[in-house]
């Protein structure tokens, strides 16, 4: 069986983990603005009860939790903490971000079908920020795959069933 820990003494590991952290940091900034705009959508009569608003808002929140989870794991590793399933945690959280990212745009587009021209500027800003979030998630995953190489798919296949368990 392969090691489930990440060697922080390795330049390779540190470099890729820092790249993942940096990508998610950029994505987090966009997520914070999107979250504020989405909260504001609730005060706009045409969007308040729009289909997709709750799922979209939940997806944005899930992405924020995912960013926090990955960055938290990286911070713990930087501090020298031994995490027995560090690779699995990293793959689980990054791949869960991939799933949330795939839901982001469809949920958003469902909401903004109800938007009137008074809020088009907010819609376009949100659409742009959603693209930024997606790009940063994809970049972080690319670095995660580079860090773990072929282990990425092996681990992802193992954790797939765990991802299917609903979170409360």
Image (cartoon, grey):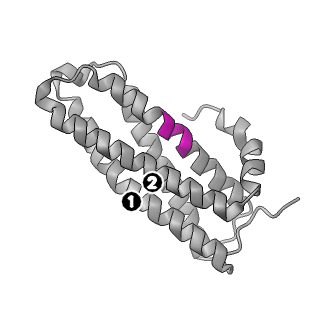
Q: CA distance from mark 1 to mark 2?
A: 7 Å
- State left or right for residue 126 relative to residue 95: left
Name the quarter where the N terminus is drawn.
bottom right
User: Please, is residue 117 above or below residue 135 in the view?
Assistant: above
Determine the residue positioned at 46% across, 61% down: 23
Q: Position of residue 95 (x, y in %)?
A: 60, 46
**Label 1 vs 2, first from the N-terminus:** 1
Which residue has dot 1 on it? Answer: 26
| Residue 34 part of the magenta-drawn span | no
Which of these two is toward me, 62 or 24? 24
Percent position (x, y) of residue 72?
A: 53, 61
Magenta region, main secondary structure: helix
Q: Which residues are magenta?
A: 97-102
* Residue drawn 71% across the image and 74% down it: 7
Question: Image quadrant of residue 113?
Answer: top left
| Residue 22 versus residue 160 in the image, above or below | below
- Quarter-of-image position of residue 48: top left
Q: Is residue 157 visible?
A: yes
Query: Which residue is rendered at x = 53% and y = 45% of the image?
Result: 97
| Label 1 element class | helix
| As drawn, 123 above or below 138 | above
The answer to which of 157 and 43 lies nearer the viewer is: 157
Q: Is residue 61 left or right of residue 66?
A: left
Label of residue 136 in the image: 2
Residue 83's disc number? none
Give the image location of residue 141, x and y in percent.
57, 54
The answer to whether marks 1 and 2 mark residues whose Cβ atoms lie closer than 8 Å is yes
Neighbour class for label 1 at 10 Å: few (<14), some, many (≥20)?
A: some
In the rendered image, residue 124, in percent from the top left (x then y), is placed at 23, 38
Q: Is the C terminus in the top left, top right, bottom left or bottom right quadrant?
A: top right
Q: Secondary structure at mark 2?
A: helix
């Amino acid at each position: 069986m392969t090691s489930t820990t990440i060697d922080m003494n390795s330049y390779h590991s540190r470099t890729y983990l820092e790249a993942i952290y940096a990508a998610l940091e950029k994505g987090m900034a966009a997520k914070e603005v999107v979250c504020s705009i989405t909260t504001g959508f609730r005060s706009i009569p045409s969007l308040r009860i729009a289909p997709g608003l709750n799922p979209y808002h939940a997806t944005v929140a899930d992405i924020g939790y995912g960013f926090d989870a990955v960055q938290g794991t990286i911070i713990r590793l930087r501090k020298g903490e031994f995490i027995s399933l560090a690779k699995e945690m990293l793959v689980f959280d990054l791949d869960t971000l991939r799933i949330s990212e795939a839901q982001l745009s469809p949920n958003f587009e469902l909401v903004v079908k109800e938007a009137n021209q008074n809020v088009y500027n907010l819609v376009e800003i949100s659409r742009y920020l959603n693209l930024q979030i997606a790009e940063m998630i994809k970049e972080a995953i690319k670095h995660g795959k580079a860090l773990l190489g072929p282990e990425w798919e092996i681990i992802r296949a193992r954790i797939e069933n765990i991802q299917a368990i609903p979170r409360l």
